[in-house]
Amino acid sequence: MIRWRKLLPGITLGAFSLLVTAQTAHDEIGWRGDHAETKEAQLGATADLSTAPRVGVDRPKPIYPLYQRDKRIHGFKPFQDLVDAAPEGSILIPPPGHYAGPVVLRKPLTIDGKGQVSIDAGDKGTVFSVEADDVVIRGLHFSGSGDSHDTDDGCLDVRGHRALIEHNRIDNCLFGIDLKQSSQSIVRHNTVSSKALDLGMRGDGLRLWYSNDNLIEGNTISDSRDMVAWYSHRNTFRNNVGMRSRYSIHFMFANHNIVEGNKFYDNAVGIYFMYTEGGGARNNLISHATGAAGMALGFKESSDHFIEGNEIIYCAVGIGSDLSPFQPGTTIRFKNNRIAYNGIAVQLTSELGGNHFNDNVFEGNLTDIFQAGRDQGDKNKWSGNYFDSYQGFDKNGDGIGDTPHEHYAYADQIWMEMPVARFFKTSPVLELLDFLERLAPFSNPELQARDPQPRYAKPVRNAG
């Protein structure tokens, strides 16, 4: 509702509207209940970090005069003028059109472009920087950042708490949305892509750095480098789509994050947990993580995660775990996942144990289980899983196999111990050698996993 309009010096009445109404942008943050118990259990959970002094961590942004920026923006009005003229706490609705960046916002303000406003920095520096709390950025198109990794050129830098970033379109920017020391913010329904560069030279579509308790929901991130969360805790990533990038999501030193309901296609790696504790992934679809390092779900020295209800298909490696779980006495729990048509379904490259697999479906994989080390079949727990390679029967019809499912490595030991031989994994020679090994073993096969109660019939999974 329009309460009043205000005429500003040098700007006509029809130039834009300032809708001054009280707006509580974050009434919908009931999602934080998922993390309430975890947060209360942590040391210092009652500290109000949002009032802590902000530490400047960004490198100084270079100042580029207009003549150094691309000529396409030389006739555009500076968007900074509208921001400077708007009263603190007001709602700015600019008239439709193209505007020139860069822009720095240092006061609480709601900017609503209604999907009809574009801000272009002319291929130099960062397009828009938010340096205040309680800011709303909605319905804008950001484009034309620089291409410098040294100064993290991007479209939208967020350096305040409780920001609402929604329904924006971001393209032709090195980095997309960059949250640093920004907590209790919402980033939702944005479309982000990087510059048309080689994969390693792109910037991150979305980055969280020392940013906690944020909701990342309903975004589409494509043709960027990574979506990352570093030193960022208790964030929720929900119903996002990630395509044609390197890491769909990469966590590092980031604890108790939840990844749910996302769809990740054609990325080198789906979800990777590195040096993390707590949280997990559920009900995600991860497909076509291919290439030399292709992996749907990865763990590096991480502990106490749950992995539930995910669909992992057509990947080089479905689940890859290195020294995980890392903390003594912790587990990583895999339940009700479908792991199908992958090169290697589960690759465990440590001897620590602690991985628990219950009620999962394994079908169509070239190799179901690769367990490094010797005679490790009893350290990880397997129960109630379905294997399409199970060779037993179910005489009493209770749906459970009469004999345990035991997965042994025969000739597979060659490529397991000599990774360069993996290139020949399905070659006729190795297939023949594997057949002869199973027929009349001339070496001791290695037990990879043992499920004492495998499912005989494939369980029905819900489409959702």
Image (cartoon, helix red, strand yellow):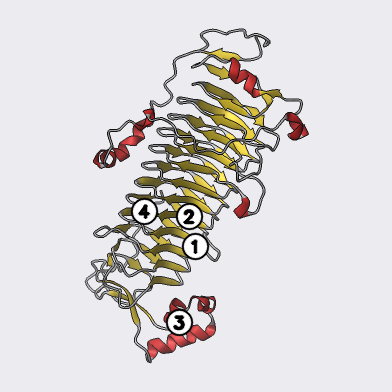
Q: Alpha carbon of mark 3 to alpha carbon of mark 4: how far?
A: 33 Å
Dot 3: within a 10 Å radius of its alpha carbon, few (fewer than 14), some, or many (20 or more) residues? some
Front residue of 420 and 367: 420
* Contact flag, marks 3 and 4 (Cβ < 8 Å): no
Residue beneath disc 4 = 309
* Percent of width and height locating residue 35: 31, 40
Residue beneath disc 3 = 414
- Going from the N terminus, do you reach mark 2 or mark 4 first? 2
| Residue 364 in sight from this viewpoint | no
* Contact flag, marks 1 and 4 (Cβ < 8 Å): no
Name the residue: 51% across, 40% down. 219
Amino acid type, callout 4: Gly
Please tell me whether mark 4 sits on a helix, a strand or a loop.
loop
Front residue of 377 and 201: 201
Amino acid type, callout 1: Cys
Residue beneath disc 1 = 315
- Going from the N terminus, do you reach mark 1 or mark 4 first? 4
Please tell me whether mark 2 sits on a helix, a strand or a loop.
strand
